[in-house]
Amino acid sequence: MVSITRRWLLKVCAAVGGSSTLAGWSPFLKFNSTNMLKQADEDAAPIKVEAKTHIAVIGAGAFGGWTALYLLRRGARVTLVDGWGPGNSRASSGGETRVIRGTYGPSQPYTKMAARATQLWKENEKRWNLKLMHQIGVLWMVTAGDDQFERGSLPLLRDAGLASQELSVQEMATRWPQINLEGVHWGIYEPEGGFLTARVACQAVFDGFLAEGGEYRQAAVAQPDLDNGKWNSLSLSDGSKVTADQYVFACGPWLGKLFPETIGGRIRPTKQDVFFFGAPAGDDRFTEARMPVWADHRDRFIYGIPGNDGRGFKVADDTRGAEFDPTSGERTISAEGLKSVRDYIAFRFPALKDAPLLETRVCQYENSPDNNFIIDRHPARKNVWLLGGGSGHGFKHGPALGEMVAGWVLEQKSPDAEFRLGRFGK
């Protein structure tokens, strides 16, 4: 509580007008100061003003950073905590780029979330005068077999107001002759999709959070037994504590270790290898100027992002890799993974058959059992929220998720059923 006393008002009047009385200020102060002076003395009871709700957000990645920012914009006092900083190399939100797209198959909430996120990315880019979203389009190549994922996506794209085009193989071949379309039957093109600069965006959100009055501590959580509902403050690795009205844990692949009973194996970190290849000199066919982001639904789901300021032609296999420790795991690619990706690009992008490998990266997904997000209160602590389960597709939704969660936390609402822990049973 913040206290405003009569002594304080007298000091203000003396400072602004040199007067020891309040009578001359009554038109501005909205009370009869002469009568007030007769009725009260220096020890009058203070006027009480409610302090801001204090919320601690643990994790400065895509989920935590955006949630902290939107809580702050809703009027809360927010302390953001992270062990290595926003967009660091261990985080699931680190790295160079992420895809933003609305194609998600039938019966899911993510197409509408992607539409809202696209709007919010644009609004914040304008606010910060910074380019984070590159709308070079997304091409989905649909091969033989089951195409219910793509067919089921089309009506949801329309309902969400996201532009899409259904393309024939001939139309794709005319627009992107550098792609070998063998085995492709048709495609979806999302002109408003594209890619986001990942670690740059995390830093931009963090900078915006600080500029708008947020508090930050770089430290790890050292509180034992978080699943026990009896703790009243959060111990940090630097010896300090954070005491807040509410706590939001958005700790990515570490969430299961912090809450072994409530989350545990419901968050499974997996090793994901990413490769960047170099196109021939003077050949711009594999840059963002000439190619969209692409996704290929063959026997394995492989995707790629061209260009990004000369970083190379990014290729990654979305297949879930081996379990991985995000803290101590060595971030080196596997020889098998490199061979598989080389074989793939030789087939689908023949001009890159002998392209040199420029860079590699190992990141991780933090998967939930059904690949849906986890957003819920802790069952033993109603002032503790758990956010996670990005499952390799969460980054794009950051601003929409942050806006949504900020509302649920501050308005004490229940999260949507598809995000709750109860869906996993006991």
Image: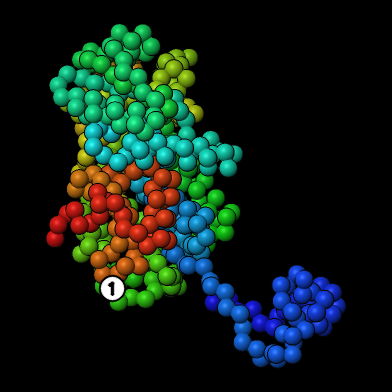
Q: Quadrant of residue 129?
A: top right
Quick check: 122 left or right of 82?
A: right
Q: Is residue 129 above or below residue 209?
A: above
- Label 1 environment density (alpha carbons within 10 Å; few <14, some 14–19, many ≥20): some
**Whether residue 415 is visible:** yes
Q: Is residue 345 visible?
A: no
Report the front residue among 219 and 112.
Answer: 112
Q: Quadrant of the N terminus?
A: bottom right
The residue under the point 47% across, 30% down is: 134
Residue 221 in the image: state x and y as whole percent. 37, 65
- Disc 1: which residue: 229
Q: Amino acid at mark 1?
A: Gly
Residue under the point 29% across and 37% down: 273
Where residue 410 sits in the image (x, y, percent)? 42, 61
In the rendered view, would you say 27 is above or below 325?
Answer: below
Quadrant (top left/top right/bottom left/bottom right) for the C terminus: bottom left
Pick whichever, 147 or 35, lies toward us. 35
The coloring applied to the image is: rainbow
Q: Residue 321: where, in percent of width, then height?
A: 21, 41
Q: Is residue 408 above or below residue 282?
A: below
366 horizontally vs 83: left or right: left
Residue under the image location 31 percent in, 67 percent down:
382
Q: Position of residue 291 (x, y in %)?
A: 41, 19
Q: Please name the residue shown 35% across and 38% down the image.
A: 112
Q: Quadrant of residue 127?
A: top right
